[in-house]
Amino acid sequence: MLLLGKHYDSLVLILISIIACCAADFVANRMQHKKIFFDLNLVIEGLFIGMFIPQSYPPLLLFFIVFVGMLICKYCFGGFAAGWVNPCALTVILAYFMGRSCFPGFLIDTSMLQTANPAGALFSANIIEPIHSDFSVTSTLNSFMSRYMGIVVPEGYVTLFWNTQAVIPAFRYNFLTLIASFILILLDMIDWIIPFCFIVVYGILVRCFSLLPAGIFWNGDILLALLTSGTLFAAFFLMPYYGTIPASILGKIIYGIIGGIVAFLICGCGTSPAGIVFTVIVTNAFSLVIQYLEEQLFSVFRIPKIKLRAENER
């Protein structure tokens, strides 16, 4: 989609991020006298990092940050599936502080949130341009949903599902993110418990409390929060990252709930430029406590720790 949309600058940054990850791994293996081989996980890490970088970010600065950030992660937190912190989120945070001017600000204010259609306010302010089919698709959906379900979808959300036009690639194509996530869940390649709990808790908090400063309760915009800030991308690909999550089902549920609470405290009602990666790192810290409690429970019930570790790294 980036290629079809002619976002070549974002594609170049993603490629630079992948090259920097591979270079950092090569240097780390040479310094530790380890056998050097190509690891596909490096491509995944570089892809995730590049997806959260604004398209105007300086390429040389990005290479330096990713290279240094991945070296720090490998030496301080362990290698792939061994560290407690998400290396992709940590590297994006470093990029945020080093090039903060390249990241956009919050797109919406309190006055917009108090309207009946906050997404429509973004279009009215020319912050986002609606796609050509938005109004026709919305009208078709409403003709069916209002008749049989009594639900009316405001205009603008079709655009947010298909292409938010954000300068950060991970924020753009929410519909494709959902499709890819469902396929990977069906293939048992990513865990569904953590994203589900995360999205549900975050959505409830946004619905109930996002307009509380304005004296309004139970009127927050859930779709706006989920379809901006890269929330869905992070929920499915960063939150359940290898090695950073609990092993037990109860631990994953608690982890997802904590992630939803932290996301609300940091990202609020949505349109945050980098709050979701901070959410991932903070939730990773809570995961340490959950994993420690899991190990204690496993030892009480005489379940070998190697089984817990294997499940956690699977």
Image (cartoon, helix red, strand yellow):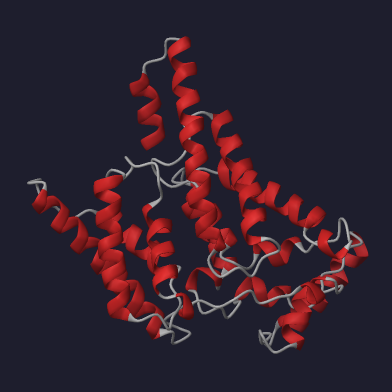
Q: Residue at x 79, y 78 (%)?
A: 155
Q: Nearer the viewer, residue 227 or 20?
A: 20
Please count the marks in the image. Answer: 0
Q: Residue at x 66, y 84 (%)?
A: 128
Position of residue 177 relative to residue 11, above or below, is: above
Whether residue 169 is visible to the viewer of this picture, yes or no, is yes
Q: Residue at x 14, y 58 (%)?
A: 27
Q: Position of residue 251 (x, y in %)?
A: 55, 31
Whether residue 178 is visible to the viewer of this picture, yes or no, is no
Q: Residue at x 48, y 44 (%)?
A: 284
Q: Nearer the viewer, residue 236 or 220?
A: 220
Please give left or right for residue 223 compared with residue 15 in the image: right
Residue 230 occupies quadrant: bottom right
Q: Position of residue 145 (x, y in %)?
A: 85, 65
Please give left or right for residue 62 compared with residue 212 in the image: left
Position of residue 104 relative to residue 93, above or below, is: below
Q: Position of residue 35 (x, y in %)?
A: 9, 47
Please give left or right for residue 266 compared with residue 212 in the image: left
Residue 138 occupies quadrant: bottom right
